[in-house]
Image (spheres, rainbow, N blue to C red):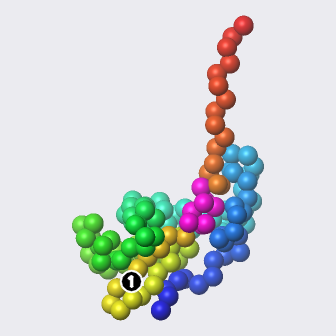
Amino acid sequence: MSKQAGPLPATLTADPPCCPPLAERRVPAETAAVLAPAFKALGDPVRLQLMSMIASAEGGEICVCDLTPAFDLTGPTISHHLRTLRQAGLVDAERRGTWVYYRARPAILRQLAALLAVAPAAPPRECP
């Protein structure tokens, strides 16, 4: 039984980046409204750590039973943070028996990363 918050908003999809990097062009208000929940979800230190553990998990997925002991938090608190990541569209979850396994949605992470991409700095110019 797959647990996912449902379809993602229109511009936050697994397709290529929705817009040029914000360093190149202003992000439209509608796009910002769609992307903000994903960035907000990653703005919490525990969720950022959970996202890192999920995204870097060997085999592409990790059991909640391996996530919970890594924190000095209660199970319900970890579940709350994982639900927030799911609702933001950053992870998928699948129940297998009594455990839930989490997988990152790499295409979404690439989309968010592309929005934050900054061109390499030009080498310093020498004065004549």
- Residue, far front: 59
Q: Secondary structure at mark 1?
A: strand
Instruction: Assign the magenta stretch its main secondary structure.
Output: helix
* Above or below, comparing residue 47 to residue 4 in the picture: above
Residue depicted at x 63% and y 48%: 117
Nearer to the camera, 75 or 65: 65
Task: Please say whether residue 58 is visible from this viewpoint.
Answer: yes
Q: Which residue is mark 1?
A: 100
* Above or below, comparing residue 70 to residue 83 in the picture: above
Coordinates of residue 27 in the picture (x, y in percent)? 72, 56
* Image quadrant assignment for residue 13: bottom right
Task: Please say whether residue 85 is visible from this viewpoint.
Answer: no
Coordinates of residue 86 in the picture (x, y in percent)? 50, 76
Residue depicted at x 56% and y 73%: 89
For disc 1, the neighbor class at 10 Å (few under 14, some 14 to 19, many from 20) is some
65 displayed left or right of 127:
left
Three-letter residue code for mark 1: Val
39 displayed left or right of 75:
right
Coordinates of residue 108 in the picture (x, y in percent)? 60, 66
* Quadrant assignment for the C terminus: top right
114 displayed left or right of 65:
right
Residue depicted at x 69% and y 11%: 127
Q: Which residues are magenta?
A: 106-113
Nearer to the camera, 84 or 117: 117
Residue depicted at x 32% and y 71%: 67
Nearer to the camera, 95 or 43: 95
* Above or below, comparing residue 108 to residue 102 in the picture: above
33 inside magenta stretch: no
Q: How many marks?
A: 1
Nearer to the camera, 33 or 24: 24
